[in-house]
Image (spheres, rainbow, N blue to C red):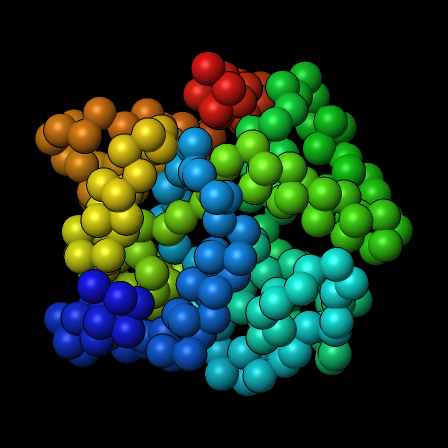
């Protein structure tokens, strides 16, 4: 099943959804995902979904990026899109473009055994104020992850965020259907790839009986016990990626 067929199936089953990703957005997210796919994925980070992107925001283009030949140019709310969270990279600014700093921290912790939140400084706006420096650090990180065989996938190819746009049952249904129809066959085609699920609820949706034996870490926003718990979660991910 290709991305168009997966989209058609999800839209057919969930045609009563109040909001639904546009096809071109879903295909663009897939292009970003494919751009950063390693030649031989060693570790697959399996998250939940990207964030709903409106047609107005999708129409915004990224400025040319030197050294990233063939990189997609439309804006989408997805961590692999470098314009998400970086208005300086866009031809016109987008309101509420805060990005997803928690996923940059997750990606960073795959390669770095962090000791404090200050360690995330190279990819966090609050610590690295210069856009040029932060942007270069993000590109370097994504290239390092690609070389190291670490790849980010989403269980749902259509957005289930913002959460208030979907019932919890619809979110689960979209994640489960997308995973079974489109993502699981990809994982089966990468038998040497280790799967680490990002989020306990995601794991329950895709593998409720634990048949697949996937490892998992909490979503960053799922750590409720404070900053020490967040750091423990990032360290756990680092161990899982590097065993």
Tally of numbered discs: 0
Q: In the figure, is residue 22 to the left or right of 146?
A: left
Does the rendering let one see residue 16? no
- Looking at the picture, tell me which residue is in the foreground, 116 or 209: 209
Q: In the figure, is residue 187 to the left or right of 124?
A: left
Residue 95, image x, y percentages = 66, 73
Residue that appears at 49% across and 83% down: 55
Residue 231, image x, y percentages = 58, 22
Does the rendering let one see residue 3? yes
Residue 64, quarter of the rendered image: bottom right
Residue that appears at 33% across and 61% down: 157
Residue that appears at 77% across and 52% down: 135
Residue 49, image x, y percentages = 39, 55
Which residue reaches farthest front? 39
Q: Is residue 140 above or below residue 86?
A: above
Q: Is residue 117 above or below residue 159?
A: above
Residue 190, quarter of the rendered image: top left
Q: In the figure, is residue 71 to the left or right of 180?
A: right
- Looking at the picture, tell me which residue is in the foreground, 144 or 159: 144
Look at the image and tell me in which quarter the N terminus lies. Answer: bottom left
Residue that appears at 48% across and 44% down: 39
Q: In the figure, is residue 140 to the left or right of 55?
A: right
Residue 100, image x, y percentages = 58, 51
């Amino acid at each position: 099943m290709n991305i168009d067929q997966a989209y058609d199936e999800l839209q057919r089953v969930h045609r009563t959804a109040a909001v639904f990703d546009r096809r071109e957005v879903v295909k663009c997210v897939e292009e970003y995902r494919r751009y950063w796919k390693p030649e031989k994925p060693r570790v697959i980070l399996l998250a939940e979904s990207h964030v709903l992107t409106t047609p107005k925001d999708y129409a915004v283009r990224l400025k040319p990026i030197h050294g990233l030949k063939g990189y997609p140019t439309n804006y989408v709310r997805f961590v692999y899109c470098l314009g998400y969270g970086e208005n300086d990279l866009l031809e016109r600014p987008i309101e509420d473009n805060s990005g997803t700093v928690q996923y940059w921290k997750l990606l960073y912790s795959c390669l770095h055994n962090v000791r404090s939140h200050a360690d995330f400084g190279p990819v966090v706006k609050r610590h690295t104020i210069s856009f040029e420096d932060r942007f270069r650090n993000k590109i370097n990180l994504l290239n390092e992850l690609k070389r190291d065989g670490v790849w980010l996938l989403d269980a749902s190819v259509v957005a289930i965020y913002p959460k208030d746009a979907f019932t919890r049952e619809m979110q689960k249904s979209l994640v489960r259907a997308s995973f079974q129809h489109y993502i699981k066959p990809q994982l089966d085609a990468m038998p040497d790839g280790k799967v680490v699920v990002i989020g306990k609820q995601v794991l329950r949706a895709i593998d409720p009986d634990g048949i697949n034996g996937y490892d998992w870490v909490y979503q960053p926003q799922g750590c409720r016990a404070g900053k020490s718990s967040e750091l423990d979660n990032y360290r756990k991910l680092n161990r899982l990626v590097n065993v």
